[in-house]
Image (spheres, rainbow, N blue to C red):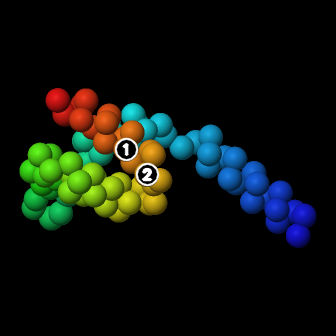
């Protein structure tokens, strides 16, 4: 049990240290492209239609972040949205 807890703690610390910052995540999302056989789709272009409705825009960005990077807490999500707004402005 002791070694298991030590290994989990080391893994958690490594993940914590290697996590990109919110500005980097916003930059990655702004350049994200999904390529299929004959098409390239930019998911952010579809979401930008919702920019005038802050609630729906925030929800859509949150869903895109969850799909791309996994679960992100609300504070980080809000900071990423602010970075995205500054990148896209």
Left or right: residue 14 versus residue 18 is right
Left or right: residue 39 versus residue 62 is left
Residue 53's label in the rendered image is none
Residue 73 location, x and y as percent?
47, 53
- At 83% from the left edge and 57% from the top edge, which residue is drawn? 6
The quarter of the picture where residue 17 lies is top right
Residue 26 location, x and y as percent?
34, 40
- At 28% from the left edge and 58% from the top edge, which residue is drawn? 59
Q: Is residue 78 visible?
A: yes
Residue 27 location, x and y as percent?
32, 37
- Label 1 crowd (10 A; few <14 / some 14-19 / many >=20): some
The quarter of the picture where residue 69 lies is bottom left
Outermost residue, bottom side: 1
- At 17% from the left edge and 29% from the top edge, which residue is drawn? 89
Q: Is residue 42 visible?
A: no
Q: CA distance from mark 1 to mark 2?
A: 6 Å
- CB under 8 Å between discs 1 and 2: yes
Residue 30 location, x and y as percent?
25, 41
Given residues 88 and 42, the one toward you in this image is 88
Question: Please, is residue 59 above or below residue 15 in the view?
Answer: below
Total marks shown come to 2
- Label 2 crowd (10 A; few <14 / some 14-19 / many >=20): few
Question: Please, is residue 22 above or below residue 4 in the view?
Answer: above
Residue annotated with mark 2: 74
Given residues 13 and 33, the one toward you in this image is 13
Question: Please, is residue 83 above or below residue 54 in the view?
Answer: above
Residue annotated with mark 1: 78
């Amino acid at each position: 049990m002791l070694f298991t807890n030590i290994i989990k703690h080391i893994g958690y610390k490594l993940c914590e240290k290697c996590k990109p910052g919110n500005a980097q995540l916003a930059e990655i999302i702004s350049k994200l492209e999904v390529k299929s056989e004959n098409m390239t789709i930019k998911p952010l272009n579809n979401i930008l239609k919702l920019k005038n409705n802050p609630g729906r825009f925030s929800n859509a960005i949150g869903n895109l972040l969850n799909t791309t990077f996994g679960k992100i807490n609300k504070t980080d999500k809000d900071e990423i949205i602010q970075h995205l707004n500054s990148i896209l402005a």
